[in-house]
Amino acid sequence: MVSKLILTYADYGTPIESGTVALEGTTISAATHDAVKAQMTALADAIDDISIGNRYRTQYIADKAESVATRPASPFAQRETKWLVRYHTSGLGIKLTCEIPCADLALLDPATDGRADVDDAGGKVAAFISAFQAYVKVGGESVVVDELVHVGRNT
């Protein structure tokens, strides 16, 4: 069975709105369960570090952890402000994307046009890329993160 990580974040709005990121990873079995769960947890924590929304729902394969959605401290935590993660498979080079809601724009690289600073002082972007590449698989193939770009979306 292919593992799946689904994270849902609350934004600052009234009423609170949600944004979700869903990622498929490596095949999971009884023998690999603990290692895959550790990769998923590391990726969820790394996504938390590049999002300023409040994560209130975490789904690991068939497991689900949920709490009450609470408003983040920052009024800039808006589900429409996202990181567009561009990545590709390591073998076939298939290009893919996913979006992470409530992007922490303090992680923007001032020397680029709306891209995350992969050499950020706190290492949050680098930690995210490492965790993402360790967990996410496409058809069993590893992936390589190309960039994180700030985008605005209405959905």
Image (cartoon, helix red, strand yellow):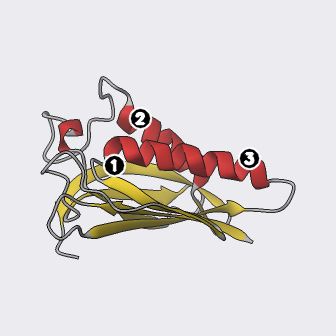
Occupied quadrant, residue 25 = bottom right
Instruction: Residue 108: give x, y in percent of width and height.
Output: 19, 40
Instruction: Residue 18: give x, y in percent of width and height.
Output: 30, 69
* Rendered position, 88 above or below 34: below
For mark 2, what is the residue? 126
Residue for point 24% across, 45% down: 104
For mark 1, what is the residue? 147
Residues at marks 3 and 1, CA–CA distance in whole angstroms: 26 Å
Dot 1, how many residues are within 10 Å of its Cα: few (below 14), some (14-19), or many (20+)? some
Amino acid marked by disc 1: Glu
Residues at marks 2 and 3, CA–CA distance in whole angstroms: 21 Å
Extreme-front residue of the structure: 68
For mark 3, what is the residue? 35
Residue for point 57% across, 57% down: 136
**Res. 47 in view:** yes
* Rendered position, 71 above or below 41: below
Amino acid marked by disc 2: Ala
Disc number lying in front (3 or 1): 3
Of the numbered discs 1 and 2, the one sitting upstream in the chain is: 2
Residues at marks 1 and 2, CA–CA distance in whole angstroms: 11 Å
Residue 135 as seen in the image, left or right of residue 11: right
Q: Is disc 2 placed on a helix, strand or loop?
A: helix
Dot 3, how many residues are within 10 Å of its Cα: few (below 14), some (14-19), or many (20+)? few
Instruction: Residue 140: give x, y in percent of width and height.
Output: 68, 64
